[in-house]
């Protein structure tokens, strides 16, 4: 294209990818004016005008307004500033669309009433503080009327949803269901009954006693090296594998120790038994529960909202390490 040549409006429209009427419109609006005109009044454009029209077309496709485009072409605003403004706008639009999608999906799933739709829309718009307050109210009611171990309550309260600044539609849908779940009086009562039974019947009193909770916290700390070793593919029969197995057995035998008894002796047979229990743990971990309770559903939804599924404990790696450690060190 010759920089000094002038082009008729039809040629300009074709080169810029616009209609003739659009080129006229931008000229009349003072966005891109012709470089000259013929004696008959036909508009003529130079190469610079065509380039500016191409930019106008691109910015319009990005939903830029005429005033914004005029400021960019006049040098009053940079393309970077315009892009930043429109990116922020686009992100807000995407957030609204994700919210709408989540509400609409929930409506289809639940066959919701008009009142429920209004409630769902309100729930997705709660602030971080309002979401925290809703979860705190839930656990306050679940813990009322009985005396669960304080440390257990702390653990329960710590498992709470943390909706990110830019949640996905799946996270919003999970939050809507979770918020409806914790607001439901019957669900709160069911969770209270479920946790009360777990803590007060069978092995519950023993498992929720202070010494046992101390041991479980200690076990969580010891379990971290197990997960790290499995993730790094440390051979279970390596010196490091034996070291971790020894730490685990030391913790396990210590659980049952009392001032009057050293507890279970550390023998090769005991290590084999512990390895077998770890393999059973792996099978249990892979088997979905036959019946899901409201507490289980609560935890599943929290996991989806937080988009951080808990790392699975490597039972099989630990089982192999325990079995290898039952053999004499070479």
Image (cartoon, rainbow, N blue to C red):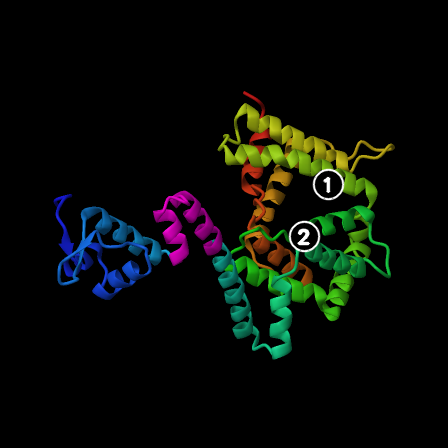
x, y percentage for residue 60? 34, 57
Q: Residue at x 37, y 48 (%)?
A: 72
Q: Is residue 207 visible?
A: no
Which secondary structure, mark 1?
helix
x, y percentage for residue 311? 57, 44
Left or right of 110, for residue 182: right
Residue 45 falls within the magenta-colored stretch: no
Residue 68 falls within the magenta-colored stretch: yes
- Identify the residue at the far front of this view: 39
Residue tagged 2 = 160
Query: Up-down: is 22 above or below 322?
Result: below
Left or right of 46, for residue 275: right
Q: Which residues are magenta?
A: 65-90
x, y percentage for residue 32? 28, 54
Residue tagged 1 = 216
Where, by quadrant of the figure, is residue 296 drawn? bottom right
């Amino acid at each position: 294209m010759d920089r000094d040549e002038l082009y008729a409006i039809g040629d300009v429209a074709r080169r810029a990818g616009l209609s003739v009427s659009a080129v006229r419109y931008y000229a009349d609006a003072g966005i891109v004016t012709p470089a000259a005109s013929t004696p008959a009044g036909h508009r003529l454009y130079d190469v610079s005008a065509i380039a500016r029209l191409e930019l106008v077309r691109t910015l319009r496709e990005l939903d830029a307004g005429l005033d914004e485009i005029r400021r960019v072409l006049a040098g009053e605003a940079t393309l970077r500033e315009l892009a930043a403004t429109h990116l922020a706008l686009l992100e807000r639009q995407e957030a609204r669309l994700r919210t709408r999608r989540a509400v609409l999906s929930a409506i289809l799933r639940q066959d919701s009433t008009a009142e429920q739709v209004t409630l769902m829309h309100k729930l997705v718009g709660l602030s971080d503080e309002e979401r925290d307050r809703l979860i705190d109210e839930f656990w306050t009611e679940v813990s009322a009327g009985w005396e669960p171990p304080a440390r257990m309550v702390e653990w329960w309260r710590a498992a709470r949803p943390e909706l990110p600044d830019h949640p996905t539609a799946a996270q919003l849908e999970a939050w809507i269901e979770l918020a409806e779940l914790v607001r439901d009086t019957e669900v709160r009562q069911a969770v209270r009954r479920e946790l009360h039974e777990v803590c007060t019947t069978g092995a519950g009193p023993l498992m929720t006693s202070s010494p046992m909770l101390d041991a479980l916290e200690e076990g969580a700390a010891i379990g971290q090296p197990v997960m790290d070793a499995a993730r790094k593919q440390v051979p279970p029969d390596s010196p490091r594998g034996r070291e971790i197995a020894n730490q685990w057995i030391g913790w396990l035998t210590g659980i049952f120790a009392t001032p009057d008894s050293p507890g279970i002796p550390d023998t090769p047979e005991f290590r084999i038994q512990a390895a077998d229990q770890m393999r059973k743990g792996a099978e249990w971990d892979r088997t979905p529960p036959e019946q899901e309770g409201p507490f289980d559903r609560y935890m599943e939804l929290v996991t989806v909202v937080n988009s951080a599924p808990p790392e699975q404990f490597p039972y099989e790696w630990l089982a192999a390490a325990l079995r290898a450690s039952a053999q004499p060190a070479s």
